[in-house]
Image (cartoon, helix red, strand yellow):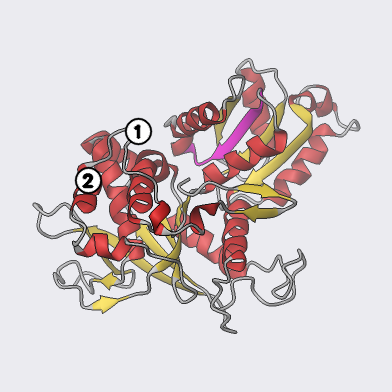
Amino acid sequence: MIVPFVRRAGRWLLPLLLMIPAACERPEVETRPTIPLVREILAAKTSPRAQMLHALEPRPLFDIALVGPESACERLAEQLVFRDSQDNVDAHFDGDGLPDFAGETFVCLEDTVSYAAILARDGEEALRTQTVLRVLAALDTLVHISPYDLEGLSTKQRSKLVVLVDPYLAEYGGFDVDTLLRSTGCHVPVVNPFELMLDQAFQETGRNDITVGVLCNPEYAASGIYEQIFARKAAEAGLTGASCVVGGVERRDSVLFTFLHDYRESGHEKPLDVILVDLFSLQQDELKMELAEIVSVMNESSMTYGRLISREFFFLNSYEQTSGFCYDFLRRYNLFTHNIAYPQVSVFRTVEHPDAENASIFVIPGSYVQN
């Protein structure tokens, strides 16, 4: 996650980072080298990209950008559009019949490519560069009406908040995005759902030896990306006894039972403190119902699988953490449009620059169809 935060009493508290002036920006002293693209932008302070980012502040009329795979972006956007969890007047948790994000526009910057494939084929620097390019595209207004429109004949709004929906983007490009935005005084937050959940889990348990389960797409479960992020975040938090087990969801019934069965068969005996659900298509209410059956002393499962659940166990899911962060950020900094209108979704796709020598991307309308 690019902008750190804590949550207390059910509300998100963003740090002073978003309130301090540009004069207090982070010194440009790298703790690790950033990629050439970021160094190039920071060196050319009068370039269009550097000027665009300089002291950029979120504004109410800006959009909310969701960056990542096509299916994940559109699923998250659909859920955000229908969210009615809080009262739009005083924000208490009770639906009022008006969408929580009334008047807002969610912009999906979608990819059909596999980020794991980019990493395997082109290497870590390439994926880091692609992440930065997508965040730049979210913050820019430029839109190309086709992959062959070299000038950029259309426009969109800038973004007041960017969500990196995919864990690969945040893990490999997060440092570079952070370096670029902090160094240019850009105050637009960039967040990742999985890291939001981890931060919340670490804070709620407050224990050094937290045991975390993760439910996700099977393809991602086999990649090791979640274990990699967990290890980094646990080390940053000083949690030397923390552990993480990842399971891919291949079916939509008996999800929790299947995960606990595999967990036990793999030799794990320590009770789980939390399960993080990083799959927008998986309903948390169904998991809670399944959990109630598993731990019930009326069922034999409580003697085996019920013991794998700690007394303080809880679920966290990507949608709730992301929507909660977005809502509280907009409300805290008065960044809602305040338009009485149904939330909108705009879809764009990213494509490579038609000139193979130009390592950049175009943003084109999702409705574009090749003739």
Residue 249 visible in this rendered orientation of the protein: no
Residue 161 visible in this rendered orientation of the protein: yes
Name the side, left or right, on which 278 lies relative to 349. right
CB-based contact (under 8 Å), mark 2 and mark 1 = no
Q: Considering the numbered disc 2 on the image, is that residue within a helix, a strand or a loop?
A: helix
Q: Considering the numbered disc 1 on the image, is that residue within a helix, a strand or a loop?
A: loop
Q: Is residue 210 magenta?
A: yes
Q: Is residue 166 magenta?
A: no
Q: Looking at the picture, how far across and down is residue 365, in whole percent?
A: 31, 71
Name the side, left or right, on which 32 lies relative to 104. left
Q: Looking at the picture, how far across and down is residue 200, in whole percent?
A: 64, 42
Of residues 106 and 46, the one drawn nearer to the viewer in this rendering:
46
Mark 2–mark 1 Cα distance, whole angstroms, equals 14 Å
Name the side, left or right, on which 231 lies relative to 38. right
Residue at the disc numbered 1: 31
Residue at 9 percent across and 58 percent down: it is 355
Dominant SS in magenta: strand
Q: Which kind of residue does numbered mark 1 sit on?
A: Thr
Q: Looking at the picture, how far across and down is residue 195, in whole percent?
A: 53, 42
Residue at 46 percent across and 56 percent down: it is 189
Residue that lies at the very extreme toward the right in this rendered image: 298
Q: Looking at the picture, how far across and down is residue 172, in whole percent?
A: 36, 39
Disc 1 crowd rating (10 Å Cα; few below 14, some 14-19, many 20+) is few
Q: Give the numbered dot on residue 173.
A: none
Q: Earlier in the sequence, mark 2 or mark 1?
A: 1
Residue at the disc numbered 2: 39
Residue that lies at the very extreme toward the bottom in this rendered image: 340
Of residues 123 and 291, the one drawn nearer to the viewer in this rendering:
123
Residue at 64 percent across and 71 percent down: it is 100
Of residues 35 and 31, the one drawn nearer to the viewer in this rendering:
31
Q: Which kind of residue does numbered mark 2 sit on?
A: Arg
Which contiguous range is marked in magenta? 209-218
